[in-house]
Amino acid sequence: MIKKNLITILIVLVAVGCGEAGYQITSIGSEIGKLEEKIVGSYEDIDEGHFIHKLVFLENGKTESYMNIQGNEQPCKFGTWKIKGHRPYELNSVHWIQEKETAVLQIYPNGDLTKIGIIKTINELGERIKEPKSIPKEDQRTYKKVK
């Protein structure tokens, strides 16, 4: 009789534990959704008065990039974007995926993005590679959210 009660208690504890783990996954999923909503919009970086680089993150996961030189806006790069990571402490960067490289952008609480790294995906010979490189602090670019 005691064994049956003990087994029942163990089964209940395991079931409750699994339920809590499922709640955590749902919670993280909703955090990613909130972060994706926050990322959608337009960002600008002024390059020491020479030109304005505009970066647009669209709801459909696409990106558009423009250079504005003396009031003349020209498209320059297109790609996609994705929040990387599945753990709460990883949810502080977005990957801007382009044809030959992926830019890693750190997300700040005020909505700004800073380019902190590059992952080269295709080399000069057209071969697929994965070569990550951090950007030194003095060379990092910050894109201010405008919309």
Image (cartoon, rainbow, N blue to C red):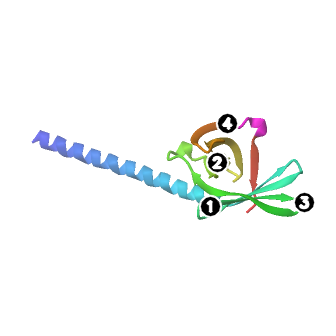
Q: Which residues are magenta?
A: 135-139
Please state which of residues 78 and 135 is positioned toward the viewer in this rendering.
78
Reading the chain from its start, which is encountered first: label 4 or label 2? Answer: 2
Q: Quadrant of the N terminus?
A: top left
Q: Where's residue 112, x and y in %?
A: 71, 51
Marks 1 and 4 sit apart, C-alpha to C-alpha, by 24 Å
Q: Amino acid at mark 1?
A: Lys
Reading the chain from its start, which is encountered first: label 3 or label 2? Answer: 3
Q: Amino acid at mark 2?
A: Lys
- What residue is pinned by disc 4? 134
Q: Amino acid at mark 4?
A: Ser
Reading the chain from its start, which is encountered first: label 4 or label 3? Answer: 3
Q: Where's residue 96, x and y in %?
A: 64, 51
- What residue is pinned by disc 3? 70
For disc 2, the neighbor class at 10 Å (few under 14, some 14 to 19, many from 20) is some
Q: Helix, strand or loop at disc 4?
A: strand
- What residue is pinned by disc 1? 62
Please state which of residues 9 and 125 is positioned toward the viewer in this rendering.
125
Mark 2 or mark 1, whichever is nearer to me: 2
**Dominant secondary-structure state across the stretch colored magenta:** helix
Taking the magenta stretch, the answer to whether it contains residue 1 is no
Q: Where's residue 30, x and y in %?
A: 50, 57
Q: Helix, strand or loop at disc 3?
A: loop
For disc 4, the neighbor class at 10 Å (few under 14, some 14 to 19, many from 20) is few
